[in-house]
């Protein structure tokens, strides 16, 4: 019996130690996430301005107000940081398409998707520019992302759209072409914002004007693909 007590005490001691260090681990994790988010935002801006070849970790460190060594601590190479920016943007776009999940109404699903993509163009215009610039230059640094992540994701949406077409809820359109049209239209508000400002005679669209433009885009896409709700099908 005496031999058991030290073991029990040791177990209690280890438990107490875990409880004591858990808040510290959470704080460290929070600090790491915060630092990574800050670096990603600064990298996104620099890559949007300079492109992958023109950007450097020194530029990103200067933008972040951190020593260059701190950038390499979180992201060992410029390419690793660049790819993380691209992957992070794709995840945002991926979540925007959640309107397709379990939604049997193409008007709601497509309309919600367009609104979410327009909002991302408003909120993350620099990220959209980084993505567009990479694609324009041949997707050299993200071909695997397109093949292994974007294509399977797109295929699932195409399948949903094709099902709506078969049920008479959409016009007989090519599903991939519809998705490309949505991408091109919504991302235009990020990638070509300078053109929009110049042609509109304004510095930038106000929130009210952007919301109005969003609803215009939604209605144009809905009409173009002939989307209708199941309850209105005749």
Image (cartoon, rainbow, N blue to C red):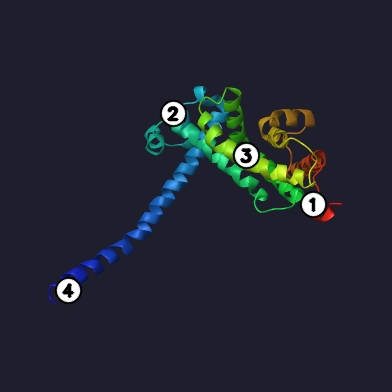
What mark, if any, has residue 229 been given in the picture?
1
- Cβ atoms at labels 2 and 3 below 8 Å apart: no
Nearest to N terminus: mark 2 or mark 4: 4
Residue highlighted by disc 4: 5
Nearest to N terminus: mark 2 or mark 1: 2
User: Please, which residue is most extreme toward the right here?
Assistant: 234
Rounded to the nearest whole Å, what is the CA distance between mark 1 and mark 4?
70 Å
Q: Quadrant of residue 12?
A: bottom left
Residue highlighted by disc 2: 58
* In the depicted structure, whether residue 157 falls above or below residue 61: below
Rounded to the nearest whole Å, what is the CA distance between mark 2 and mark 4?
57 Å
Q: For the residue labelled by badge 2, is the local secondary structure a helix, a strand or a loop?
A: helix
Q: For the residue labelled by badge 3, is the local secondary structure a helix, a strand or a loop?
A: helix
What mark, if any, has residue 3 been given in the picture?
none
Q: Quadrant of residue 203?
A: top right
* Residue name at image x 81 percent, y 38 percent: 224
Nearest to N terminus: mark 4 or mark 3: 4
Q: For the residue labelled by badge 4, is the local secondary structure a helix, a strand or a loop?
A: helix
* Residue name at image x 71 percent, y 43 percent: 161
**Image quarter in which the N terminus is found:** bottom left
């Amino acid at each position: 019996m005496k031999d058991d007590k030290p073991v029990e005490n040791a177990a209690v001691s280890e438990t107490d130690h875990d409880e004591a260090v858990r808040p510290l681990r959470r704080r460290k994790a929070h600090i790491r996430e915060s630092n990574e988010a800050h670096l990603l935002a600064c990298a996104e801006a620099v890559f949007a301005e300079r492109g992958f070849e023109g950007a450097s970790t020194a530029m990103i460190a200067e933008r972040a107000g951190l020593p260059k060594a701190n950038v390499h601590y979180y992201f060992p190479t410029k390419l690793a940081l660049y790819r993380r920016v691209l992957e992070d943007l794709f995840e945002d776009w991926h979540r925007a398409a959640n309107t397709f999940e379990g939604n049997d109404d193409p008007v709601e699903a497509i309309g919600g998707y367009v609104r979410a993509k327009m909002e991302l163009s408003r909120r993350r215009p620099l990220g959209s520019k980084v993505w567009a610039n990479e694609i324009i230059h041949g997707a050299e640094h993200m071909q695997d992302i397109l093949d292994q992540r974007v294509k399977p994701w797109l295929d699932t949406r195409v399948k949903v759209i094709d099902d709506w077409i078969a049920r008479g809820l959409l016009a007989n359109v090519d599903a991939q072409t519809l998705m490309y049209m949505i991408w091109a239209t919504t991302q235009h508000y990020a990638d070509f914002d300078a053109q929009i400002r110049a042609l509109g005679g304004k510095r930038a669209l106000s929130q009210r004007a952007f919301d109005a433009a969003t609803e215009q885009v939604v209605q144009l896409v809905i009409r173009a693909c002939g989307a209708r709700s199941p309850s209105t099908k005749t």
